[in-house]
Amino acid sequence: STPPVKVAVTGAAGQIGYSLLFRLASGALLGPDTPIQLRLLEITPALKSLEGVVMELDDCAFPTLDSVEIGDDPNHIFDGVNLALLVGARPRTKGMERGDLLSANGAIFTGQGKALNDHAADDVRIGVTGNPANTNALIAMTNAPDIPQERFSALTRLDHNRAISQLAAKTGSKVSDITKMTIWGNHSATQYPDIFHAEIGGKNAAEVVGDQSWIENDFIPTVAKRGAAIIEARGASSAASAASATIDAARTWLTGTPEGDWASMAVRSDGSYGVPEGLIYSFPVTTSNGDWEIVQGLEIDDFSRAKMDATAQELVEERDAVTELGLI
Ligand code: NDP
């Protein structure tokens, strides 16, 4: 069989972790023939709870799960990892200003970036789910100078999946008929879900919908505010779908996008589409063998341009804030 893959998960005892670990262990990432070694990082007070999760992982007797290691030291947990899923982050609590949030997370992601730099495997890929995901990825990337910058990405796949689901419901189509969905920008309320290049069974999605008002006043806000709607409905955040999207994103990155389709991934901007270079910005990308490429040449109209610029502007402000804090 194939050699085992070492996967680190941070915040492993959290809500997302509770969905993510079981799917990773069951082979959802690379199939049942690739053994998986889990390396789980938590803050010290959460280690006991993490031990309980590991007991449950044991009890599942997953044939794909080769080993599990837990700890609170990133230098040890990240040792030799091929994939690092950075889920743990400091949530925004009541009365916390954005600057407080950025500095609390800055401390986490500078340390983890350095630890990955010094200890991860040469082929490491790093996916950031913990919020503010784009800027956390920027901090980790900047603090890991020896890791190629294209190895860092932040998660917009959940937004991408949400957009596909909304479009399928609107048009009575199957999710599997929808291709070329794009999320531009930040994983935040300013993100721009774009169906002007998407296709349904090969036909242009915006033309199939034929309703600009639905796109502007229904689709875009529904996708952008879906997280809040789920908290409102279930009284807890969208952890299972975030875990599922985290796996989708990593699998696509490592194994490739299908012919004729692309995925949304927040990656370092090279200036494509006028997005300021160096921002971690979500683009349409094709992937193969662990590498990604930004899809080029899409026509951007004034409506899309304004939305792409607004979400870029938010990321510039976040970058300025963490620069001022000395985190990058
Ligand atoms: P969750 O597992 O629910 O969420 C973890 C992170 O994912 C948060 O930043 C959250 O952002 C983000 N996220 C991204 N997309 C989504 C989505 N669609 N729905 C929900 N969350 C999303 O948080 P918990 O508080 O349950 O668990 C976090 C764990 O991380 C804790 O166990 C804590 O101890 C740990 N932690 C570990 C660290 C480490 O390993 N060094 C550092 C910091 C924390 P948002 O806050 O915006 O919901």
Image (cartoon, rainbow, N blue to C red):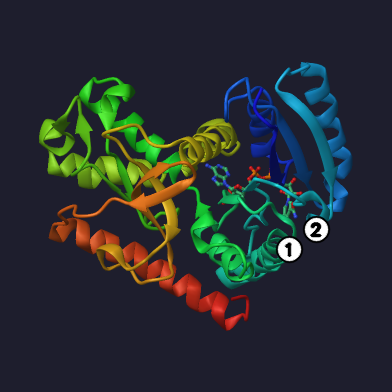
Q: Quadrant of residue 328?
A: bottom right
Q: Earlier in the sequence, mark 1 or mark 2?
A: 2
Residue 180 is left or right of residue 243, and the answer is left
* Residue name at image x 83 percent, y 53 percent: 76
Q: Position of residue 51 (x, y in %)?
A: 87, 35
Q: Is residue 187 left or right of residue 182?
A: right
Q: Secondary structure at mark 1?
A: helix
Residue under pointer 1: 118
Image location of residue 111, percent across then percent down: 72, 65
What residue is shown at x 48% (from left), y 58% (from top)?
150
Q: Disc 1 versus disc 2: distance between alpha carbons?
A: 8 Å
Q: Residue at x 57, y 48 (%)?
A: 129
The answer to whether residue 226 is seen in the rendering is no
Kindly check if marks 1 and 2 are in contact, taking CB atoms under 8 A apart as contact.
Answer: yes
Q: Which mark is residue 247?
A: none
Residue plotted at (57% across, 83% down): 324
Q: Nearer the viewer, residue 238 or 260?
A: 260
User: In this figure, what is the number of numbered marks?
Assistant: 2
Q: Give x and y (percent) for residue 273.
A: 25, 63
Task: Name the residue tied to disc 2.
Answer: 75
